[in-house]
Image: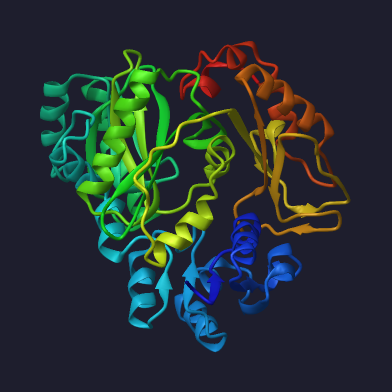
Amino acid sequence: MFKKILIANRGEIALRVIRTCKEMGIKTVAVYSTADADSLHVRFADEAVCIGPPRSVDSYLAIPKIIAAAEITNADAIHPGYGFLSENAEFSRICAENQIKFIGASPAMIEAMGDKASAKATMKAAGVPTIPGNEGILESLDQAKKIAKKIGYPVMLKATAGGGGKGMQVCNDPEELAEGWESTRREAGAAFGNDGMYMEKFVVEPRHIEIQIAADQRGKACHLSERDCSIQRRHQKLVEETPSPYMTDKLREKMGKAAIKAAEAVKYEGVGTVEFLVDANRDFYFMEMNTRIQVEHTITEEVVNYDLIKEQIKLAAGENISGKNYYPQMHAIQCRINAEDPDRNFAPCPGRITDYHSPGGHGVRLDTHVYAGYQIPPYYDSMISKLIVVAQTREEAILKMQRALDEYVIEGVKTTIPFHQRLMRHERFRSGDFTTKFMEEETV
């Protein structure tokens, strides 16, 4: 087992990793930018190293500075959290070259799953259901038109290096495809430095349901059931829950087996997530594989009583899994609390928190790094906390989340708490009858 782990991240996920490390008797090293000097992850780590000025490119994305911090503190492993360098193949490779264990996927695995076109081809070869579309990267608009005619409109143009909702466009006919071809390529090139495009059949009435998996160094995998992430805005998740209100026992078994097949086909190591789109007929299609811990791992932990960060560390250290699959025994919901104004199109609202009161009580969990007096910096993602509740049923979980949100006080900055309060009382959400188009179709 590792003696000291450096956490190459910030905020609530860095604090989350520190907590598990302490419970395992492992020393921790926090890295931080000058903007994060007062963050709780810096305060609670055993050691802390400042790695640069506020901009991510000068600190949390500066690989030489992070490796140097690991070397001067004698850390024998690095946990990347999520975001930043968590799915950066070059960082994984450099860690290995410096005899530092990267607690995550191998460079080859990140490269194989990071390119969406090659990932889809790999999954198709493994027998995992994939959305009908083209093989490889589209070479021209003429080729795109021929494929669209073959699979039928509507189609989705996607950047092969895309993410976060960028480089994507739905096209309902040949005219829209022609218009979208250049604009989507330009957006992809600007955002990712890669304008490669591929095309898929657009799934009608889609739900975004993902399967949590864990796999050891022998290539053996298990699944920990699903999370429903369909409530999202501009492809950014807002609320996650498990089990999915759309799930059936039969579908869960089929999706679980497909996720295990996906992991074992690529000899995956560690914890990861296989993301699917599920249509109106409950047919499901592989979307992508995230080779890291997810923001929403918390709800899986609550319904199966399983510390995923601990498992991630153990798997990286070479321990084996039992091969047992895990199924939800309770119902959990997570609300992402962002420093954004939901009444002004979710505009970011950095600033100082003047008053703060966290909710509590049975079945309430709060993962956060903020407190009264904390200055939310403008340089990073606007998520400041994750509020999680767990109860016997979905109805009870919704009521518990309402109560917890009503108790949650953050003053001095605007947050998404009022949005979540309205959502929990929205009849369509409460009924479980929603798709990824919910935010486009409803006023919350």
Closer to us: 208 or 149: 208
Up the image or down, 100 lies above or below 377; here it is: below
The residue located at (52%, 39%) in the rendering is 300
Whether residue 331 is visible here, answered yes or no, is: yes
Closer to us: 134 or 280: 280
Q: Position of residue 213 (x, y in %)?
A: 38, 44
**Left or right: 293 as drawn, with respect to 406:** left
Q: Position of residue 174 (x, y in %)?
A: 21, 23
Q: Residue furthest bottom?
A: 72
Up the image or down, 113 lies above or below 401; here it is: below
Which picture quadrant has residue 431?
A: top right
Image quarter hosting the C terminus: top right
**Left or right: 380 as drawn, with respect to 243:** right
Number of marks in picture: 0
The residue located at (48%, 71%) in the rendering is 78
**Left or right: 25 as drawn, with respect to 90:** right
Q: Position of residue 428 (x, y in %)?
A: 59, 12
Closer to us: 335 or 415: 335
Up the image or down, 34 lies above or below 256; here it is: below
Which picture quadrant has residue 193?
A: bottom left
Q: Position of residue 222 (x, y in %)?
A: 35, 43
